[in-house]
Image (cartoon, rainbow, N blue to C red):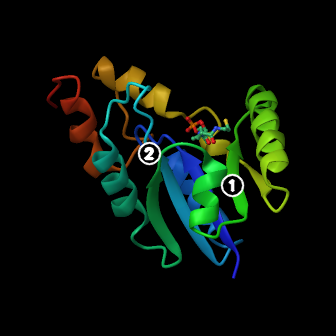
């Protein structure tokens, strides 16, 4: 059984993430969406909030589950018997950083393979940072995240619709 992990901060999860999750769930037997609990990074949403949003968004995909981890990704992968890392590539600007992490993780554990999925054209501009930037000014984020998340995101900036 091939277990893959799609790791990230997901602060918050977007349609771009969902696209990668849906497509990679067809490649591996089980996909774990691994939410990084990084206490040093100031995230807008708590770990619990991020996990809960991803669960809501992926409830329709039977072989996806959501987990969270602290510390090194390679250590968490051992814990859950995952051997494949899935990452999305939006543009060439993502590539250098992603290549470095993929190679470093491969050196740490030679059993690990990183698979890059190119983002769908519809979402190649989209990131959690873009969502937060637009939301912070009360901008339209309806093309970025599901309807049921919009108020939760605005609430972080004390914005009501
Ligand atoms: O959504 P992000 O912030 O681009 O995800 C980055 C992530 C979580 C994949 C990366 O920072 C990570 O794996 N962090 C865990 C710590 C680790 O293993 N570091 C070594 C590789 S950078």
Which residue position holds label 2? 13
Q: Position of residue 56 (x, y in %)?
A: 33, 62
Circle 1 Cα neighbour tier, 10 Å, few/some/many (<14 / 14–19 / ≥20): many
Q: Quadrant of ligand 1?
A: top right
Residue 19 versus residue 71 in the image, above or below: below
Residue 10 versus residue 135 in the image, above or below: below
Which residue position holds label 1? 86
Q: Nearer the viewer, residue 77 or 62?
A: 77
Q: Nearer the viewer, residue 127 or 87?
A: 87
Side of 5 relative to 158 (left or right):
right
- Discs 2, 1 touching: Cβ within 8 Å: no
Sequence order check, earlier mark of 2 and 1: 2
Mark 1 residue element = strand
Say which residue appears at 23% left-offset and 40% top-offset. 152
Side of 123 relative to 98 (left or right):
left
> As drawn, which residue projects farthest toward the top?
137
Quadrant placement of the N terminus? bottom right
Q: Position of residue 23 (x, y in %)?
A: 65, 64
Q: Position of residue 129 (x, y in %)?
A: 48, 26
Q: Quadrant of residue 89?
A: top right
Q: Position of residue 75 (x, y in %)?
A: 62, 53
């Amino acid at each position: 059984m091939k277990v893959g992990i799609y790791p990230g901060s997901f602060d918050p999860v977007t349609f771009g993430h969902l696209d990668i999750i849906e497509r990679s769930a067809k490649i591996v037997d089980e996909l774990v969406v691994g939410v990084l609990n990084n206490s040093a990074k100031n995230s807008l949403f708590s770990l619990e909030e991020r996990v809960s949003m991803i669960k809501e968004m992926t409830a329709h995909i039977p072989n996806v589950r959501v987990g969270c981890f602290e510390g090194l990704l390679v250590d968490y992968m051992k814990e859950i018997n995952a051997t494949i890392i899935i990452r999305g590539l939006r543009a060439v600007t993502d590539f250098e950083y992603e290549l470095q992490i993929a190679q470093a993780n491969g050196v740490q554990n030679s059993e690990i393979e990183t698979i890059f999925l190119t983002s769908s054209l519809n979402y190649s501009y989209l990131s959690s940072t873009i969502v937060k930037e637009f939301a912070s000014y009360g901008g339209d984020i309806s093309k970025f995240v599901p309807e049921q998340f919009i108020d939760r995101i605005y609430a972080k900036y004390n914005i009501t619709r």
